[in-house]
Amino acid sequence: MQDLKKYIEDNKDRFLEELFELIRIPSISSKEAHKDDMYKAAEWVKESLLKKGADKAEVCDTEGHPVVYGEKTINPDLPTVIIYGHYDVQPVEPLELWKSEPFQPEIRDGKIFARGADDDKGQMFMHFAAFEYLLKTDQLPCNVKFMIEGEEEIGSPSLGKFLKDNREKLAGDVILVSDTAMLGQDTPSITTGLRGLSYCEVHVTGPNRDLHSGLYGGAVANPVNILCDMISSLVDENGRITVKGFYDDVEELSDEERKEMARAPFDEEGYKKSIGVKELKGEKGYSTLERTGIRPSLDVNGIWGGYTEKGAKTVLPSEAHAKISMRLVPHQNSEKITQLFKDHFLSIAPDCVKVEVQFLHGGEGYVSPTDTPEYQAASKAYEESYGIKPVPYRSGGSIPIISMFEQILGIKSILMGFGLETDAIHSPNENYPLSQFYKGMETIPHFYKFFAEMKK
Protein backbone atom coordinates (compact mmCIF):
# COMPACT_ATOMS: atom_id res chain seq x y z
CA MET A 1 0.00 0.00 0.00
CA GLN A 2 2.78 2.38 -0.90
CA ASP A 3 0.36 4.64 -2.76
CA LEU A 4 -1.96 5.04 0.26
CA LYS A 5 -0.53 8.30 1.60
CA LYS A 6 -0.44 9.79 -1.91
CA TYR A 7 -4.06 8.84 -2.50
CA ILE A 8 -5.11 10.57 0.73
CA GLU A 9 -3.05 13.66 -0.12
CA ASP A 10 -4.47 13.85 -3.66
CA ASN A 11 -8.07 13.54 -2.44
CA LYS A 12 -8.00 15.19 0.99
CA ASP A 13 -9.84 18.36 -0.07
CA ARG A 14 -12.62 16.31 -1.67
CA PHE A 15 -12.88 14.09 1.38
CA LEU A 16 -13.25 17.14 3.59
CA GLU A 17 -15.97 18.67 1.47
CA GLU A 18 -17.88 15.39 1.41
CA LEU A 19 -17.68 15.16 5.19
CA PHE A 20 -18.81 18.78 5.49
CA GLU A 21 -21.92 17.98 3.43
CA LEU A 22 -22.92 15.40 6.03
CA ILE A 23 -22.02 17.61 8.98
CA ARG A 24 -24.25 20.40 7.64
CA ILE A 25 -27.28 18.15 8.14
CA PRO A 26 -28.40 18.75 11.77
CA SER A 27 -29.20 15.10 12.53
CA ILE A 28 -30.02 15.45 16.24
CA SER A 29 -31.72 12.18 17.12
CA SER A 30 -33.14 13.30 20.46
CA LYS A 31 -35.27 16.11 19.01
CA GLU A 32 -38.53 15.46 17.17
CA ALA A 33 -38.04 18.71 15.21
CA HIS A 34 -35.10 17.07 13.39
CA LYS A 35 -36.93 13.95 12.18
CA ASP A 36 -36.69 15.05 8.55
CA ASP A 37 -33.00 15.76 9.01
CA MET A 38 -32.50 12.19 10.21
CA TYR A 39 -33.89 10.84 6.94
CA LYS A 40 -31.88 13.37 4.97
CA ALA A 41 -28.67 12.21 6.69
CA ALA A 42 -29.57 8.55 6.14
CA GLU A 43 -30.12 9.19 2.42
CA TRP A 44 -26.77 10.99 2.25
CA VAL A 45 -25.02 7.99 3.83
CA LYS A 46 -26.73 5.61 1.38
CA GLU A 47 -25.75 7.66 -1.66
CA SER A 48 -22.19 8.05 -0.37
CA LEU A 49 -21.78 4.27 0.01
CA LEU A 50 -23.01 3.73 -3.55
CA LYS A 51 -20.62 6.36 -4.90
CA LYS A 52 -17.74 4.77 -3.01
CA GLY A 53 -18.42 1.43 -4.66
CA ALA A 54 -20.94 -0.55 -2.61
CA ASP A 55 -22.87 -3.15 -4.61
CA LYS A 56 -26.02 -1.98 -2.91
CA ALA A 57 -27.13 0.32 -0.12
CA GLU A 58 -30.53 0.93 1.40
CA VAL A 59 -32.26 3.02 4.05
CA CYS A 60 -34.03 0.61 6.40
CA ASP A 61 -36.95 1.94 8.41
CA THR A 62 -37.21 1.09 12.10
CA GLU A 63 -39.63 2.10 14.84
CA GLY A 64 -37.33 5.10 15.34
CA HIS A 65 -34.71 6.58 13.03
CA PRO A 66 -33.55 4.55 10.03
CA VAL A 67 -30.51 2.29 9.73
CA VAL A 68 -28.46 2.44 6.53
CA TYR A 69 -27.22 -0.92 5.28
CA GLY A 70 -24.67 -1.39 2.49
CA GLU A 71 -22.47 -4.18 1.20
CA LYS A 72 -19.68 -5.09 -1.18
CA THR A 73 -19.10 -8.76 -1.95
CA ILE A 74 -15.94 -9.65 -3.84
CA ASN A 75 -15.95 -13.37 -3.00
CA PRO A 76 -18.42 -15.18 -0.72
CA ASP A 77 -15.61 -17.48 0.46
CA LEU A 78 -13.60 -14.57 1.89
CA PRO A 79 -14.08 -13.13 5.39
CA THR A 80 -16.47 -10.23 5.94
CA VAL A 81 -15.83 -7.03 7.87
CA ILE A 82 -18.90 -5.13 9.14
CA ILE A 83 -18.42 -1.39 9.60
CA TYR A 84 -20.60 0.13 12.32
CA GLY A 85 -21.07 3.87 12.77
CA HIS A 86 -23.78 6.41 13.52
CA TYR A 87 -24.95 9.51 11.70
CA ASP A 88 -26.89 11.03 14.60
CA VAL A 89 -25.37 13.68 16.87
CA GLN A 90 -25.90 15.26 20.26
CA PRO A 91 -27.84 18.51 20.79
CA VAL A 92 -25.70 21.66 20.50
CA GLU A 93 -26.86 23.69 23.51
CA PRO A 94 -25.64 25.98 24.99
CA LEU A 95 -25.33 27.72 21.63
CA GLU A 96 -23.73 30.85 23.08
CA LEU A 97 -20.58 28.89 23.97
CA TRP A 98 -19.86 27.91 20.37
CA LYS A 99 -17.23 30.03 18.61
CA SER A 100 -18.74 29.11 15.23
CA GLU A 101 -22.04 27.70 14.00
CA PRO A 102 -22.19 24.03 15.09
CA PHE A 103 -23.51 22.80 11.73
CA GLN A 104 -21.31 25.05 9.58
CA PRO A 105 -17.92 23.31 9.85
CA GLU A 106 -14.84 25.48 10.10
CA ILE A 107 -11.15 24.63 10.13
CA ARG A 108 -9.16 26.44 12.81
CA ASP A 109 -5.76 25.57 14.23
CA GLY A 110 -5.63 22.41 12.15
CA LYS A 111 -8.95 21.10 13.47
CA ILE A 112 -12.48 20.68 12.14
CA PHE A 113 -14.92 22.47 14.46
CA ALA A 114 -18.54 21.29 14.22
CA ARG A 115 -21.07 19.05 15.90
CA GLY A 116 -20.29 15.53 14.70
CA ALA A 117 -16.78 16.40 13.55
CA ASP A 118 -15.46 13.56 15.72
CA ASP A 119 -18.55 11.82 17.13
CA ASP A 120 -19.21 10.11 14.86
CA LYS A 121 -19.47 11.61 11.40
CA GLY A 122 -15.75 12.35 11.07
CA GLN A 123 -14.64 8.96 12.34
CA MET A 124 -17.33 7.13 10.35
CA PHE A 125 -16.34 8.89 7.12
CA MET A 126 -12.74 7.68 7.48
CA HIS A 127 -14.09 4.20 6.74
CA PHE A 128 -15.89 5.44 3.64
CA ALA A 129 -12.65 6.98 2.35
CA ALA A 130 -10.63 3.85 3.16
CA PHE A 131 -13.25 1.71 1.39
CA GLU A 132 -13.03 3.93 -1.69
CA TYR A 133 -9.23 3.69 -1.74
CA LEU A 134 -9.19 -0.11 -1.46
CA LEU A 135 -11.70 -0.48 -4.28
CA LYS A 136 -10.17 2.14 -6.60
CA THR A 137 -6.73 0.52 -6.25
CA ASP A 138 -8.08 -3.04 -6.45
CA GLN A 139 -6.72 -3.93 -3.01
CA LEU A 140 -9.88 -4.83 -1.08
CA PRO A 141 -9.02 -8.28 0.35
CA CYS A 142 -12.38 -9.23 1.86
CA ASN A 143 -16.10 -8.51 1.79
CA VAL A 144 -17.48 -5.43 3.51
CA LYS A 145 -20.86 -4.61 5.03
CA PHE A 146 -21.97 -1.29 6.49
CA MET A 147 -24.45 -0.76 9.32
CA ILE A 148 -24.85 2.96 10.01
CA GLU A 149 -27.58 3.88 12.50
CA GLY A 150 -29.30 7.07 13.63
CA GLU A 151 -30.00 6.44 17.33
CA GLU A 152 -26.66 5.84 19.05
CA GLU A 153 -26.87 9.11 20.96
CA ILE A 154 -30.21 8.09 22.47
CA GLY A 155 -29.24 4.54 23.38
CA SER A 156 -29.99 2.72 20.08
CA PRO A 157 -33.54 1.68 21.09
CA SER A 158 -34.42 0.33 17.63
CA LEU A 159 -31.18 -1.44 16.80
CA GLY A 160 -31.80 -4.63 18.78
CA LYS A 161 -34.88 -5.49 16.71
CA PHE A 162 -33.04 -4.57 13.52
CA LEU A 163 -30.25 -6.99 14.43
CA LYS A 164 -32.67 -9.81 15.26
CA ASP A 165 -34.67 -9.27 12.07
CA ASN A 166 -31.55 -9.20 9.88
CA ARG A 167 -29.25 -11.85 11.38
CA GLU A 168 -28.61 -13.49 8.00
CA LYS A 169 -27.99 -10.21 6.22
CA LEU A 170 -25.55 -9.16 8.97
CA ALA A 171 -23.50 -12.35 8.98
CA GLY A 172 -19.80 -11.53 9.24
CA ASP A 173 -16.50 -12.16 10.97
CA VAL A 174 -15.82 -8.93 12.86
CA ILE A 175 -17.49 -5.58 13.52
CA LEU A 176 -15.12 -2.65 13.10
CA VAL A 177 -15.99 0.55 14.97
CA SER A 178 -14.37 3.98 15.10
CA ASP A 179 -16.30 5.81 17.81
CA THR A 180 -13.71 5.97 20.59
CA ALA A 181 -10.55 7.89 21.44
CA MET A 182 -6.81 7.25 21.61
CA LEU A 183 -4.69 8.00 24.66
CA GLY A 184 -2.84 10.72 22.76
CA GLN A 185 -1.93 11.98 19.32
CA ASP A 186 1.40 10.15 19.46
CA THR A 187 0.14 7.31 21.67
CA PRO A 188 -2.06 5.01 19.60
CA SER A 189 -4.34 2.79 21.64
CA ILE A 190 -7.08 0.25 21.06
CA THR A 191 -10.13 0.39 23.29
CA THR A 192 -10.54 -3.06 24.82
CA GLY A 193 -13.21 -2.21 27.38
CA LEU A 194 -16.31 -0.04 27.61
CA ARG A 195 -18.53 0.71 30.56
CA GLY A 196 -22.23 -0.08 30.52
CA LEU A 197 -24.91 2.49 31.26
CA SER A 198 -28.10 3.03 33.20
CA TYR A 199 -29.67 6.43 32.57
CA CYS A 200 -32.62 7.58 34.66
CA GLU A 201 -34.68 10.71 35.21
CA VAL A 202 -36.02 11.45 38.69
CA HIS A 203 -38.95 13.67 39.62
CA VAL A 204 -39.68 15.06 43.08
CA THR A 205 -43.05 16.71 43.71
CA GLY A 206 -44.09 18.67 46.81
CA PRO A 207 -47.00 21.12 46.98
CA ASN A 208 -49.62 21.15 44.22
CA ARG A 209 -48.32 24.48 42.84
CA ASP A 210 -45.42 26.88 43.21
CA LEU A 211 -45.77 28.72 46.51
CA HIS A 212 -44.74 32.16 47.78
CA SER A 213 -41.40 31.51 49.48
CA GLY A 214 -42.09 34.13 52.12
CA LEU A 215 -45.54 32.90 53.10
CA TYR A 216 -44.66 29.19 52.95
CA GLY A 217 -40.88 29.00 53.26
CA GLY A 218 -39.81 27.14 56.39
CA ALA A 219 -43.20 25.45 56.76
CA VAL A 220 -43.41 23.39 53.56
CA ALA A 221 -40.72 21.08 52.18
CA ASN A 222 -38.93 22.48 49.14
CA PRO A 223 -38.62 19.76 46.45
CA VAL A 224 -35.38 21.26 45.12
CA ASN A 225 -33.81 21.13 48.58
CA ILE A 226 -35.07 17.59 49.11
CA LEU A 227 -33.75 16.45 45.72
CA CYS A 228 -30.33 17.93 46.44
CA ASP A 229 -30.20 16.12 49.79
CA MET A 230 -31.20 12.83 48.17
CA ILE A 231 -28.62 13.18 45.41
CA SER A 232 -25.82 14.11 47.78
CA SER A 233 -26.44 10.90 49.74
CA LEU A 234 -25.90 8.69 46.68
CA VAL A 235 -22.09 8.88 46.91
CA ASP A 236 -20.23 8.78 50.22
CA GLU A 237 -17.09 10.63 51.38
CA ASN A 238 -14.87 7.90 49.87
CA GLY A 239 -16.47 8.15 46.44
CA ARG A 240 -18.44 4.91 46.91
CA ILE A 241 -21.99 4.67 45.57
CA THR A 242 -24.38 4.00 48.45
CA VAL A 243 -27.07 2.10 46.53
CA LYS A 244 -27.45 -1.27 48.27
CA GLY A 245 -26.14 -4.12 46.11
CA PHE A 246 -24.55 -1.78 43.56
CA TYR A 247 -21.10 -3.39 43.76
CA ASP A 248 -22.24 -7.03 44.04
CA ASP A 249 -21.23 -7.93 40.49
CA VAL A 250 -18.28 -5.57 40.03
CA GLU A 251 -15.19 -7.44 38.86
CA GLU A 252 -12.14 -6.77 41.03
CA LEU A 253 -9.02 -6.78 38.88
CA SER A 254 -5.89 -8.47 40.20
CA ASP A 255 -2.81 -6.51 41.23
CA GLU A 256 -1.10 -7.82 38.11
CA GLU A 257 -3.88 -6.57 35.85
CA ARG A 258 -3.84 -3.17 37.55
CA LYS A 259 -0.05 -2.95 37.07
CA GLU A 260 -0.52 -3.69 33.39
CA MET A 261 -3.13 -0.91 33.14
CA ALA A 262 -0.75 1.50 34.86
CA ARG A 263 1.70 1.09 31.97
CA ALA A 264 -0.54 3.31 29.84
CA PRO A 265 0.99 6.80 29.61
CA PHE A 266 -1.07 9.36 31.48
CA ASP A 267 -0.23 12.98 32.30
CA GLU A 268 -2.40 13.80 35.31
CA GLU A 269 -1.31 17.44 35.47
CA GLY A 270 -2.05 17.88 31.78
CA TYR A 271 -5.39 16.15 32.28
CA LYS A 272 -6.37 18.59 35.03
CA LYS A 273 -5.15 21.58 33.06
CA SER A 274 -7.08 20.55 29.94
CA ILE A 275 -10.41 20.65 31.84
CA GLY A 276 -9.57 23.59 34.10
CA VAL A 277 -9.61 21.93 37.53
CA LYS A 278 -7.07 22.03 40.35
CA GLU A 279 -7.91 18.69 41.93
CA LEU A 280 -9.40 15.37 40.86
CA LYS A 281 -11.98 13.47 42.87
CA GLY A 282 -13.26 9.91 42.79
CA GLU A 283 -13.38 6.54 44.48
CA LYS A 284 -10.69 6.19 47.14
CA GLY A 285 -7.94 3.69 46.43
CA TYR A 286 -8.03 3.90 42.63
CA SER A 287 -6.09 5.89 40.04
CA THR A 288 -7.78 8.27 37.61
CA LEU A 289 -7.56 5.78 34.72
CA GLU A 290 -8.91 3.01 36.95
CA ARG A 291 -11.81 5.18 38.08
CA THR A 292 -12.89 5.71 34.48
CA GLY A 293 -11.92 2.30 33.11
CA ILE A 294 -12.62 -0.45 35.65
CA ARG A 295 -14.84 1.18 38.30
CA PRO A 296 -18.51 2.23 38.09
CA SER A 297 -19.66 5.79 38.67
CA LEU A 298 -22.82 7.81 39.31
CA ASP A 299 -23.30 11.37 38.10
CA VAL A 300 -26.01 14.00 37.80
CA ASN A 301 -26.21 15.05 34.14
CA GLY A 302 -28.78 17.80 34.63
CA ILE A 303 -30.93 19.26 37.37
CA TRP A 304 -33.76 21.79 37.31
CA GLY A 305 -36.75 23.15 39.19
CA GLY A 306 -38.31 26.44 40.23
CA TYR A 307 -37.54 29.77 38.59
CA THR A 308 -34.35 29.78 36.50
CA GLU A 309 -34.76 32.79 34.21
CA LYS A 310 -32.98 36.12 34.72
CA GLY A 311 -34.02 38.23 37.66
CA ALA A 312 -35.79 37.20 40.87
CA LYS A 313 -39.01 35.36 41.51
CA THR A 314 -39.48 34.28 45.10
CA VAL A 315 -41.15 30.90 44.78
CA LEU A 316 -41.02 27.65 46.62
CA PRO A 317 -41.10 25.21 43.66
CA SER A 318 -43.71 22.54 43.26
CA GLU A 319 -41.35 20.21 41.41
CA ALA A 320 -37.68 19.34 41.01
CA HIS A 321 -36.07 17.06 38.43
CA ALA A 322 -32.70 15.51 37.63
CA LYS A 323 -31.11 13.25 35.04
CA ILE A 324 -28.76 10.68 36.59
CA SER A 325 -26.42 8.33 34.75
CA MET A 326 -24.60 5.34 36.15
CA ARG A 327 -21.61 4.02 34.23
CA LEU A 328 -21.26 0.29 34.77
CA VAL A 329 -18.39 -2.16 34.44
CA PRO A 330 -18.54 -5.63 32.85
CA HIS A 331 -20.72 -8.15 34.77
CA GLN A 332 -23.00 -5.38 36.07
CA ASN A 333 -26.39 -5.76 34.44
CA SER A 334 -28.04 -2.46 33.47
CA GLU A 335 -31.59 -3.67 34.22
CA LYS A 336 -30.58 -4.97 37.65
CA ILE A 337 -28.72 -1.75 38.51
CA THR A 338 -31.67 0.36 37.34
CA GLN A 339 -34.01 -1.54 39.65
CA LEU A 340 -31.56 -1.29 42.57
CA PHE A 341 -31.27 2.46 42.01
CA LYS A 342 -35.02 2.91 41.73
CA ASP A 343 -35.68 0.94 44.93
CA HIS A 344 -32.98 2.85 46.81
CA PHE A 345 -34.04 6.30 45.61
CA LEU A 346 -37.67 5.68 46.55
CA SER A 347 -36.62 4.32 49.95
CA ILE A 348 -34.74 7.49 50.92
CA ALA A 349 -37.57 9.84 49.93
CA PRO A 350 -39.20 11.62 52.92
CA ASP A 351 -42.99 11.56 53.24
CA CYS A 352 -43.24 15.28 52.53
CA VAL A 353 -42.66 14.70 48.78
CA LYS A 354 -43.64 12.25 46.04
CA VAL A 355 -40.84 10.67 44.00
CA GLU A 356 -40.85 9.01 40.59
CA VAL A 357 -37.91 7.30 38.84
CA GLN A 358 -38.09 6.91 35.07
CA PHE A 359 -35.62 4.75 33.12
CA LEU A 360 -34.53 6.40 29.86
CA HIS A 361 -31.97 4.03 28.33
CA GLY A 362 -28.98 1.82 29.06
CA GLY A 363 -26.87 -1.14 28.04
CA GLU A 364 -24.09 -3.49 29.06
CA GLY A 365 -20.34 -3.08 29.27
CA TYR A 366 -17.91 -4.84 26.97
CA VAL A 367 -14.41 -6.30 27.15
CA SER A 368 -12.53 -7.29 23.99
CA PRO A 369 -9.87 -10.00 24.24
CA THR A 370 -6.40 -9.11 22.94
CA ASP A 371 -5.38 -12.56 21.72
CA THR A 372 -7.73 -12.79 18.71
CA PRO A 373 -6.84 -12.35 15.02
CA GLU A 374 -9.11 -9.31 14.93
CA TYR A 375 -7.24 -7.54 17.71
CA GLN A 376 -3.85 -8.53 16.36
CA ALA A 377 -4.78 -7.20 12.92
CA ALA A 378 -5.81 -3.87 14.45
CA SER A 379 -2.61 -3.74 16.50
CA LYS A 380 -0.45 -4.35 13.43
CA ALA A 381 -2.41 -1.72 11.48
CA TYR A 382 -1.66 0.97 14.07
CA GLU A 383 1.96 -0.14 14.23
CA GLU A 384 2.20 0.13 10.45
CA SER A 385 0.93 3.72 10.34
CA TYR A 386 2.26 5.08 13.66
CA GLY A 387 5.49 3.13 13.91
CA ILE A 388 4.77 1.96 17.46
CA LYS A 389 2.64 -0.76 19.02
CA PRO A 390 -0.72 0.51 20.33
CA VAL A 391 -1.65 0.28 24.01
CA PRO A 392 -4.75 -1.74 24.99
CA TYR A 393 -6.99 0.62 26.93
CA ARG A 394 -10.26 0.39 28.86
CA SER A 395 -12.40 3.45 28.22
CA GLY A 396 -14.83 5.09 30.61
CA GLY A 397 -17.31 5.67 27.82
CA SER A 398 -20.28 3.54 26.83
CA ILE A 399 -21.45 2.17 23.51
CA PRO A 400 -24.22 -0.14 24.74
CA ILE A 401 -24.83 -1.77 21.39
CA ILE A 402 -21.32 -3.28 21.27
CA SER A 403 -22.31 -5.97 23.77
CA MET A 404 -25.61 -6.35 21.88
CA PHE A 405 -23.71 -7.21 18.69
CA GLU A 406 -22.09 -10.17 20.40
CA GLN A 407 -25.29 -11.30 22.11
CA ILE A 408 -27.47 -11.21 18.99
CA LEU A 409 -25.05 -11.66 16.08
CA GLY A 410 -22.33 -13.63 17.86
CA ILE A 411 -19.64 -11.35 16.44
CA LYS A 412 -16.80 -9.65 18.28
CA SER A 413 -16.14 -5.93 17.82
CA ILE A 414 -12.82 -4.12 17.43
CA LEU A 415 -12.78 -0.48 18.53
CA MET A 416 -10.29 1.41 16.37
CA GLY A 417 -10.90 4.97 17.51
CA PHE A 418 -8.87 8.02 16.47
CA GLY A 419 -10.52 10.73 18.56
CA LEU A 420 -8.68 12.63 21.28
CA GLU A 421 -9.72 13.60 24.80
CA THR A 422 -9.45 17.25 23.73
CA ASP A 423 -12.05 16.89 20.96
CA ALA A 424 -14.90 18.12 23.21
CA ILE A 425 -17.44 15.57 22.00
CA HIS A 426 -20.95 16.23 23.38
CA SER A 427 -19.78 19.75 24.29
CA PRO A 428 -19.71 23.15 22.58
CA ASN A 429 -16.86 23.50 20.07
CA GLU A 430 -16.57 19.81 19.28
CA ASN A 431 -13.57 19.34 17.03
CA TYR A 432 -11.46 16.75 15.26
CA PRO A 433 -7.81 17.29 14.27
CA LEU A 434 -7.18 16.97 10.55
CA SER A 435 -4.11 14.90 11.39
CA GLN A 436 -6.30 12.29 13.12
CA PHE A 437 -8.85 12.37 10.31
CA TYR A 438 -6.20 11.53 7.74
CA LYS A 439 -4.30 9.13 10.01
CA GLY A 440 -7.46 7.09 10.43
CA MET A 441 -7.80 6.82 6.65
CA GLU A 442 -4.21 5.64 6.53
CA THR A 443 -4.57 3.03 9.28
CA ILE A 444 -7.89 1.40 8.39
CA PRO A 445 -6.77 -0.13 5.05
CA HIS A 446 -3.91 -1.89 6.85
CA PHE A 447 -6.47 -3.54 9.14
CA TYR A 448 -8.18 -5.11 6.12
CA LYS A 449 -4.86 -6.38 4.79
CA PHE A 450 -3.68 -7.97 8.04
CA PHE A 451 -7.12 -9.30 8.96
CA ALA A 452 -7.56 -11.05 5.61
CA GLU A 453 -4.08 -12.58 5.90
CA MET A 454 -4.76 -13.89 9.40
CA LYS A 455 -8.13 -15.40 8.42
CA LYS A 456 -6.70 -17.46 5.53
Image: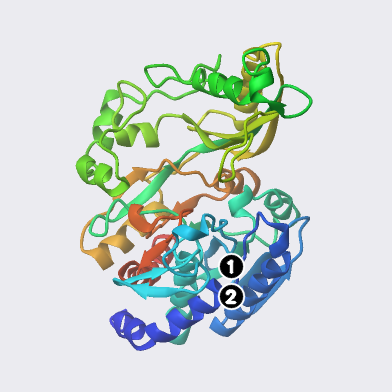
Q: Is residue 136 above or below residue 118?
A: below
* Circle 1 SS class: strand
Is residue 138 in view?
Answer: no
| Residue named by callout 1 | 145
The picture places residue 68, in percent across and down from the top left corner, at 66, 67
The picture places residue 423, in percent across and down from the top left corner, at 38, 58
For label 2, count other residues whose C-alpha is less than 10 Å away and answer few (under 14), some (14-19) or many (20+).
many
- In the image, 240 versus 207, the foreground residue is 207
* Residue appearing at x 42%, y 61% in the figure: 429
Q: Quadrant of the C terminus?
A: bottom left
Quadrant in which residue 352 is drawn: top right
The picture places residue 341, in percent across and down from the top left corner, at 61, 23
Q: In this view, does 414 lie above or below 109?
A: above
Asked if marks 1 and 2 touch (Cβ < 8 Å), the reply is: yes
* Circle 2 SS class: strand
Q: Which amino acid does label 1 sit on?
A: Lys
Q: Is residue 417 above or below residue 444?
A: above
Is residue 44 in view?
Answer: yes
* Residue appearing at x 60%, y 68% in the figure: 26
Residue 22 vs residue 359: left or right?
left
Q: Which amino acid does label 2 sit on?
A: Lys
The picture places residue 225, in percent across and down from the top left corner, at 58, 22
Mark earlier in primary sequence (1, 2)? 2
| Residue named by callout 2 | 72
